[in-house]
Image: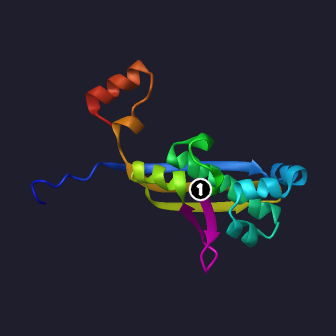
């Protein structure tokens, strides 16, 4: 490694999980129709789901799980900054745009994988990736014992 090269930062998992009752998505579509669909889903997601409530609900859960893995919640990333589309075999893939892509770059997120499942009344998604371990992201705002442990043993 050349002398001027910065050593790679330690890495850790980024994980997010979400579950939603499918009737909640059905209800909001019934009330708001295309307005809701176009606010939350990309045109390709809408085309893929073809109005199937379980497919829309599981993508909603997946988007929320991605937001958790990004560490932002729903305030930091827009719904359409995250797109969930299948590959040729049906495996769901995550695509990030705009603020989602910017946030992923900030935390050096890579290898984002999503697993989704749904029943008649529930939809669930889990997302995992790998990100940089940083003081800004991994130090709690409060908690004397936790802060002392970090000072003594370092980030983990």
Q: Position of residue 64 (x, y in %)?
A: 63, 49
Q: Position of residue 123 (x, y in %)?
A: 73, 55
Farthest residue to the bottom: give it.
Answer: 88
Q: Residues within 10 Å of mark 1 (few under 14, many from 20)?
A: some
Say which residue appears at 62% left-offset and 43% top-offset: 74
Q: Closest to the observer: 3 or 23? A: 3
Say which residue appears at 63% left-offset and 64% top-offset: 84
Q: Closest to the observer: 34 or 114? A: 34
Q: Closest to the observer: 6 or 130? A: 6
Badge 1 marks a residue whose secondary structure is helix
Residue 125: tell me if it is visible.
no
The answer to whether residue 45 is above or below residue 64 is: below
Farthest residue to the left: give it.
Answer: 3
Residue highlighted by disc 1: 81
Seen in the image, is 36 located left or right of residue 83? right
| Count of labels in the image | 1
Q: Position of residue 35 (x, y in %)?
A: 81, 54
The region drawn magenta spans 81-96
Q: Closest to the observer: 96 or 58? A: 96
Residue 14 counted in the magenta span: no
Farthest residue to the top: give it.
Answer: 144
Q: Position of residue 2 (x, y in %)?
A: 11, 59
Say which residue appears at 78% left-offset and 60% top-offset: 119
Residue 90 counted in the magenta span: yes
């Amino acid at each position: 490694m050349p002398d001027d090269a910065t050593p790679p930062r330690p890495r850790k998992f980024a994980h997010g999980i979400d579950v939603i009752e499918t009737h909640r998505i059905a209800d909001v579509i019934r009330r708001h129709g295309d307005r809701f669909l176009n606010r939350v889903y990309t045109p390709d997601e809408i085309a893929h789901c073809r109005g199937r409530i379980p497919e829309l609900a599981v993508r909603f859960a997946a988007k929320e799980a991605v937001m958790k893995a990004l560490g932002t919640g729903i305030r930091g990333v827009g719904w359409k900054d995250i797109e969930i589309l299948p590959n040729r075999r049906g495996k769901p893939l995550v695509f990030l745009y705009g603020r989602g892509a910017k946030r992923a770059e900030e935390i050096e997120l890579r290898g984002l994988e999503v697993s989704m499942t749904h029943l008649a009344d529930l939809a669930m998604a889990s997302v995992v990736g790998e990100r940089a371990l940083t003081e800004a992201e991994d130090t709690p705002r409060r908690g004397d014992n936790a802060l002392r442990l970090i000072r003594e043993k370092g980030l983990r």
